[in-house]
């Protein structure tokens, strides 16, 4: 295994451990409100932790359209990050020997 793959894996593990406490807190909070399948789908489809917790808080006394609007507003702070990602990503692919290493 090349050095790039080892470093990518170790970076990914560190990021995963950073997400673990938030994921556990969401699972504990969601358990009395929604079932396991809904919790898993919400974690997979609603990537923002703030949006997940906001949805749980609004489930009981808000309409679905209100929840969708609130999550959309929560996601607005990701627009600058997405714009920077589009500008930076092509350079990442060609900064190393192969594009696969850049993706990792």
Image (spheres, grey):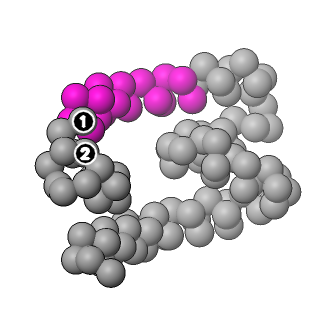
Q: Which residues are magenta?
A: 71-89
Residue at label 2?
Answer: 93
Q: Quadrant of the N terminus?
A: bottom left
Q: Quadrant of the C terminus?
A: bottom left
> Is 79 rendered above or below residue 96?
above
> Is 104 rendered above or below residue 52?
below
Task: Find out whether residue 75 is within the magenta segment.
Answer: yes
Task: Find out whether residue 53 is within the magenta segment.
Answer: no
The residue under the point 54% across, 23% down is: 72
In this image, 71 relative to 11: left or right? Answer: right
**Circle 1/circle 2 CB separation < 8 Å:** yes
Mark 1 secondary-structure assignment: helix
Q: x and y percent of residue 12 in the render? A: 37, 68
Q: x and y percent of residue 47 in the render? A: 54, 44
Visible residue check, residue 70: yes
Q: CA distance from mark 1 to mark 2?
A: 5 Å
């Amino acid at each position: 295994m090349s050095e790039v793959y080892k470093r990518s894996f170790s970076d990914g593990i560190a990021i995963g451990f950073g997400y673990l406490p938030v994921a556990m807190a969401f699972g504990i909070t969601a358990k009395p409100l929604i079932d396991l399948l809904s919790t898993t789908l919400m974690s997979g489809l609603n990537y923002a932790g703030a949006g997940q917790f906001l949805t749980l808080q609004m489930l009981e006394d808000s309409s679905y359209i209100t929840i969708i609007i609130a999550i959309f507003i929560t996601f607005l702070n990701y627009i600058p990050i997405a714009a920077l990602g589009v500008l930076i990503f092509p350079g990442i692919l060609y900064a190393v020997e192969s594009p696969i290493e850049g993706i990792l």
